[in-house]
Amino acid sequence: MTTEPHTVERRFLATCGLQDDEQLRRIGVVLIAQTIVDRHLISVLVEHEAGKVGGAGVMDIDALTHLSEEICALTFAQHLQRARGLIPARAAEIAGEIERARTTFVHFKRNRFELPHYNGNPVAETTGFRACMDAVQEFLTLVPFRDAAWTANR
């Protein structure tokens, strides 16, 4: 098995204006961070909805799994909107900025391609990446993962 980059990789990097593998790694980590933030939001929503019927402990696993699947089917933006009153304002601010970074990068619009930014700083660069990761770490502290969602998604 070869470890050489696929020939199309160089084209992708050039298209995105990436200079090196480190910039690519940083963008990949930011995209993964957005996924982790989303999972935390989902766990908050599952816990909240389960709480309306007495909590995850009184629900059978099928009902909890169904609830989790319904919430998981929503978009990140919907998760964030529904979780806003359930999480600290600072956590919602961080999640919103992470989502803007991902959306701007992933959803192409003519004359609008740009690499992801966090609070105006490009995450492919050291300063922007560090600011983004510091904020994600703060989010994870503010919004710990709720176990009910994990139980329902095994």
Image (spheres, rainbow, N blue to C red):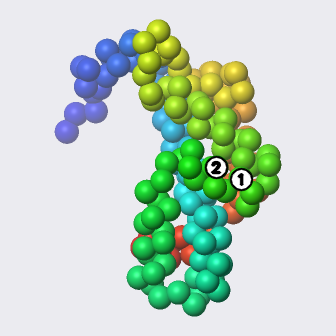
Q: Horizontal and vertical percent for residue 4?
A: 27, 27
Label 2 vs label 1: CA separation?
A: 5 Å
Position of 144 relative to 36 (above/below): below
Is residue 19 in sight in this rendering? no
Q: Name the one closer to the observer, 31 or 78.
A: 78
Is disc 2 placed on a helix, strand or loop? helix
Question: Where is residue 53, by image quadrant?
Answer: bottom right
Q: Name the one closer to the observer, 13 or 2.
A: 13
Is residue 53 in sight in this rendering? yes
Q: Amino acid at mark 1?
A: Arg
Q: Is residue 100 left or right of residue 144?
A: left
Where's the N terminus, which quadrant?
A: top left
Position of 38 relative to 124 (above/below): below
Position of 77 relative to 2 (above/below): below
Which residue: 51% across, 38% down? 31
Q: Horizontal and vertical percent for residue 16?
A: 43, 16
User: Circle 1 sits on which residue?
Assistant: 84
Which residue: 68% across, 22% down? 121
Q: Among all residues in the image, which is located at the extreme left?
A: 1
Which residue: 70% across, 21% down? 120
Q: Amino acid at mark 2?
A: Gln
Q: How many marks?
A: 2
Q: Is residue 52 left or right of residue 21?
A: right
Q: CB atoms at circles 2 and 1 under 8 Å apart?
A: yes
